[in-house]
Amino acid sequence: MKIAVTGKGGTGKSTLAGILAHLFKEHGYTVLAVDADPDANLASALGVPGEDAAGITPISAQRELIKERTGANPAQFGQLFKLNPTVADIPDEFSLTFRGIKLLVMGAVKKGGGGCACPENVLLRSLLEEIILRRNEAVIVDMEAGIEHLGRGTARAIDRLLIMVEPGRRSIDTARTIKRLAADVGIRRFGVVGNKVRSAAERDWILRQFPGEPVLGMIPYAEAILDADRGGRPLIDALDAGLRAEFERIFAALPEDKSADFVP
């Protein structure tokens, strides 16, 4: 099962990705959680202790690894380098394990202008392809607001693209852009998840933005999640029965043989 979570920044992507990772683990899956958002927050959402999270070096910042695998120095242009570096061992060797969940932090490549055919990007793209196409485990990828760094073949291998939204116009506009980009690279199975919903009116407003489309759940605004985040505790430990039931509902809608639309 390969799940990617995306959406406008601040909508709660990492919250959903972290809690889903724990739910997959609780249901007996081997789990690899991948933080592919430059604004890395997945370690916090999982509940990785601060001192352990501080010791994580993103793959994109591991200069010796990049040089070893691509044959070129990072951040230097005009070099020849391998376009298909060896990456199969990286998820196991460079991940941190917390409560039985492997966490891999990809990091980001700062670039000015369009694309960047540089060693860092080649390694990250190859690594993401390896994880999604060839890893035999439940993979949850916390992505930035978009899917531009997914190749067409990699994107098609995703079992479900989850798009986080909140009751706001910019969030909805971002979701629609993501859906269009997803269709362009062949992603057909997606689901919308509402978050920070404070009222039935906000819930209904979100539903009206996606008529006839799969809305897998509505997560209410919850101070308990914010408190757990501030306290550095695993977010899943902060869920009361009602909140947990909503996340479980989203989890239950993920297998390919289910397509549970939201029922108010």
Image: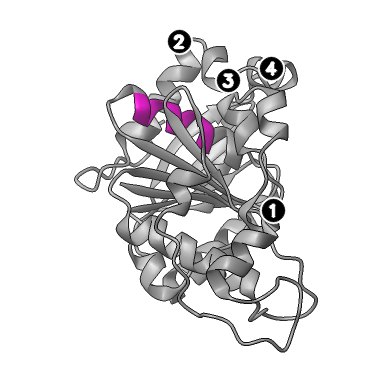
Task: Give the magenta part as a residue range.
Answer: 17-25
As drawn, 158 above or below 250: below
Quickly name the residue at label 1.
38
Q: CA distance from mark 1 to mark 2?
A: 32 Å
Q: Tell me if 157 is positioned left or right of 209 in this view.
A: left
**Residue 111 horizontal/vertical position (percent):** 76, 72
Mark 3: amino acid = Pro
In this rendering, the label closer to the viewer, 2 or 3? 3
Q: CA distance from mark 1 to mark 3?
A: 21 Å
Considering every residue shown, the one lying at the far right of the view is 112
Of pointers 1 and 3, the one earlier in the residue sequence: 1
Q: CA distance from mark 2 to mark 3?
A: 16 Å
The label number, if any, that marks residue 241 in the structure image: 2
In this rendering, the label closer to the viewer, 1 or 4? 1
Q: CA distance from mark 3 to mark 4?
A: 14 Å
**84 within the magenta span:** no
Mark 2: amino acid = Ala
**Residue 15 horizontal/vertical position (percent):** 58, 33
Quickly name the residue at label 3.
234
